[in-house]
Amino acid sequence: MPARPAHPPDPHEPTNPGRTHHAHPLLRCPRTRTPAPPLVPLVRAAATAGHDVAVLTSGGMRDALAAELPGVPVLAAGPMPPELFAEVARRLPGSDPANRPEPAAVAEFFAGTRVDLTVDDAVREARTWGPDVVVADAVDLVGPLVAATLGVPYAVVAFGPEVPDAFRRPMTELVLPPVRGPGPGAVTPRWRCSTRRRRPCRRPGGRSTPLTVPFRAEPHSRPGDTTPLPPFPASERPRVLVTLGTVFGDAALLTAIIDGLHPDEADVLATVGVIGDHLEDTDHVHHVPFRPMRELLDGVDVVVSAAGAGTVLAAASVGVPMVLLPQGADQFINAERAAAADVAVVVDEPAAVGPAVHAVLAGSRHAAAARRLREENEQRPSAGDAIAVLVDRVTRATSAAER
């Protein structure tokens, strides 16, 4: 444990986000091929502020995180998603939580299989490293169990729509029976670092939700990555970004979407993600490999995507309207919320993407709503502000507990 301040802060004193104490936060990243977007800015902010920070995730993420977060230790625990999905299919024959996200299968993935195959290694790695606080993704159940086992506070990072009760309840019910000692508190965070617009409310029975520490969403960036994108011919055409993310990338689907766009209406920048096929460029259609979203969004007028949480948040944070074609996982929920905010048009087949893009470009409603969302996001605190508040709260709680 790091040394405490010489004069412990008064727990009744107003929080001062500018006062930073040295801390030892452990961030738990459970995502697939790339780190969850809000966690990366928080890790960078913690490291920049001088805290010892580590990321607890599958060993298969080590190389990707070395590029994203140079110098930040990666504590390896648990398998990558393909192995987890295979085990879920073995336990629940016929299930497919990625493409058919039904409550029982989703609960088995997050709260059953992932916990069973990860938590022992995670506890061992975390105990050796010695965190003051565990910060975990909102759908991660390993992080809170690690925090409960080690007896340290736990904070949740909430981004994208709230997980519906129909999914949250079976996840909680599945993970609680194996817990001995901590009980339901093992999955109850003390703090919530949130990019969501929703304000804190009270739970049934008068219990308050965790204290919310807001921070702004931002597109994924990678320091030092300045490789320019291929230039389009000089024109007044709008630009459309087509990206299916790192999970649901499919050459046939990507090609069908691009073919449905009017060839004279826009320049198209398409990410090939995990697609192994070689796709031919034209003067007005360029295919690029994985790139940080901040670079891809520069100069874009409309984003076409499968409604992954990272892409939707990134586009909304910079005020770009969207056309969304959800494929699975949480994408249908993300798309529904984006449409409700009027920043997106949701379609259910590739042939509908072209007309939807034309409607968004021809109108002003969705672009205006996206600009309003960007302005609202810009007023939120930075990731650095959120880390300062979180560390201050952890220090206060620890000092109070030691008295």
Image (cartoon, rainbow, N blue to C red):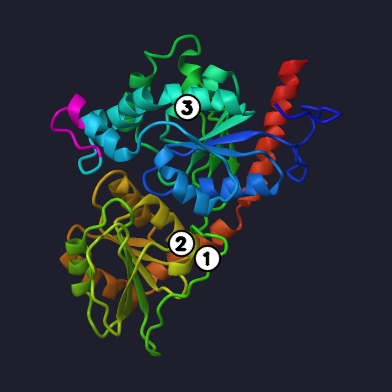
Outermost residue toward the left in this view: 94
Question: Residue tagged by mark 3?
Answer: 122
- Which amino acid, by three-letter code, is at mark 1? Asp
CB under 8 Å between callouts 2 and 1?
A: yes
- Could you tell me which secondary element the residue under label 3 belongs to? helix
Outermost residue toward the bottom in this view: 234
Magenta span: 89-97
Residue at image coords 86%, 28%:
7
Any part of residue 36 in sight: no
Residue count near mark 3 (Cα–Cα under 10 Å), binned few <14, some 14–19, many ≥20: many
- Could you tell me which secondary element the residue under label 2 belongs to? loop
Q: Position of residue 351 (x, y in %)?
A: 16, 67
Left or right: residue 19 compared with residue 195: right
For the residues carrying marks 2 and 1, which lies nearer the camera in this image? 1
Residue at image coords 36%, 44%:
32
- 3D distance between C-alphas at marks 3 and 1: 31 Å
Q: Which mark is residue 225?
A: 1
Residue count near mark 2 (Cα–Cα under 10 Å), binned few <14, some 14–19, many ≥20: some
Task: State which quarter of the image contains the N terminus.
Answer: top right
Q: Is residue 254 above or below residue 60?
A: below
- Which amino acid, by three-letter code, is at mark 2? Pro
Taken as a whole, is the magenta stretch helix, strand or loop? loop
CB under 8 Å between callouts 3 and 1?
A: no
Q: Is residue 377 above or below residue 201?
A: below
Outermost residue toward the right in this view: 7
Q: Which mark is residue 138?
A: none
Q: Which mark is residue 292?
A: 2
* Sooner in the amino-acid sequence: mark 3 or mark 2: 3
As for residue 172 lying within the magenta part, the answer is no
